[in-house]
Image (cartoon, rainbow, N blue to C red):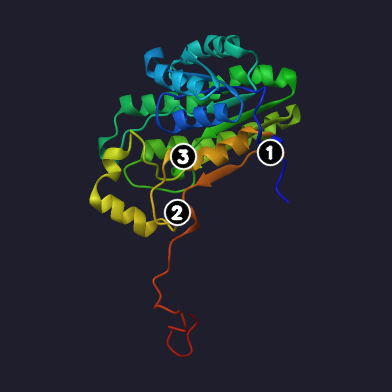
Amino acid sequence: MNPPPALFSLEGRNALVTGASRGIGRTIAEALAANGARVVCAARTIKDLEDLVETIRKAGGQAKALAMDVGDRDSLPAAAAAAEACFGPLDILVNNAGVNFREPLEEISGEHFDRILSINVEGMLFLTQAVARGMMARRSGKVINVGSITTGFGLSNLAVYSLTKGAVGQLTKALATELGRHNIQVNALCPGFIMTPMTNKLWSMPHMQEWGKRRIPLGRVATPADLIGSAVFLASAASDYVTGHSLFVDGGFTAGEPWPIPSGGGNVAPPGEIA
């Protein structure tokens, strides 16, 4: 029996999505609005959000734009208050803002290290702190931390980014154990390889396309739309007993890869050996 539609409804909920101007953040903001949430769309500049807010409104949803620099820790309490002033107390926080520099170990700079950590970890933690105070008082809330395939899998030339996204997974678990008694669910949404404005150049390379098709069990690189169902699930009452979980939406990449045994299987080991 299918669950009643209300289980996934976000009617009457207020959401804040950071890094909402494009890619994954934009898609999640549109998805939450389409399912009834009033969405505060945040990015560093209002101008980058104008088209998103207009798109949501034309589709019948409710949205407002908010300038927010997640990398500026001291500004986050006021930014959280400004977000709540848009529609009211926040029921859903989507920590999506993030930055990356693909660099081999010998080229990592202190400047890039500080920038990545300030947004991907420090900003996520202190924005959650500011928003969670109200959720704790109301004894209700959903926090969705956007991780990465590198939350649980190593990739070369991504040492600092992987460090931060691994931290997202552990931060999610720690906050889930701390906030559970306040009826706040904290989960991580971990996309696999996604075609976004930030990654289109990479995935337009023929050798990368071929590698992705061969290595990903579902045979393709994802689009942001592939995250919609998971995001709505984690934001809705359907996930009320799910917390501290990292949900990998990666086409099966982290599950493993096809084993190149001969077609049809069979015992391919020499007699007397274990296959």
Lower sequence index among marks 3 and 1:
1
Badge 3: few (under 14), some or many (20 or more) residues near its Cα, within 10 Å? some
Contact between marks 3 and 1 (CB within 8 A): the answer is no
Badge 1: few (under 14), some or many (20 or more) residues near its Cα, within 10 Å? few
Kindly report the distance in space between the C-alpha atoms of the residues bearing marks 3 and 1: 20 Å
List the residue tagged with mark 2: 253
Please tell me whether mark 2 or mark 1 is closer to you in this view: 1
In percent of the image, x 52 and y 12: which residue is there? Answer: 79
In percent of the image, x 71 and y 32: which residue is there? Answer: 180
Please tell me whether mark 3 or mark 1 is closer to you in this view: 1
Kindly report the distance in space between the C-alpha atoms of the residues bearing marks 2 and 3: 18 Å
Q: In this view, does 191 lie to the left or right of 4?
A: left
Kindly report the distance in space between the C-alpha atoms of the residues bearing marks 2 and 1: 30 Å
Q: Is residue 245 left or right of residue 19?
A: right
Label 3: element kind: helix
Residue 210, position as x, y percentages in the image = 29, 56
State the mark number for residue 5.
Answer: 1
Q: Is 181 located above or below residue 41 in the figure?
A: below
| Residue 219 in view in this figure | yes
Say what amino acid the circle numbered 1 marks.
Answer: Pro
List the residue tagged with mark 3: 225
Residue 2, position as x, y percentages in the image = 70, 48
Seen from the viewer's position, the closer of residues 240 and 27 is 27
Seen from the viewer's position, the closer of residues 248 and 60 is 60
In which quarter of the view is residue 268 placed? Answer: bottom left
In percent of the image, x 44 and y 84: which residue is there? Answer: 269
Seen from the viewer's position, the closer of residues 49 and 140 is 49
Lower sequence index among marks 2 and 1:
1
Say what amino acid the circle numbered 2 marks.
Answer: Phe
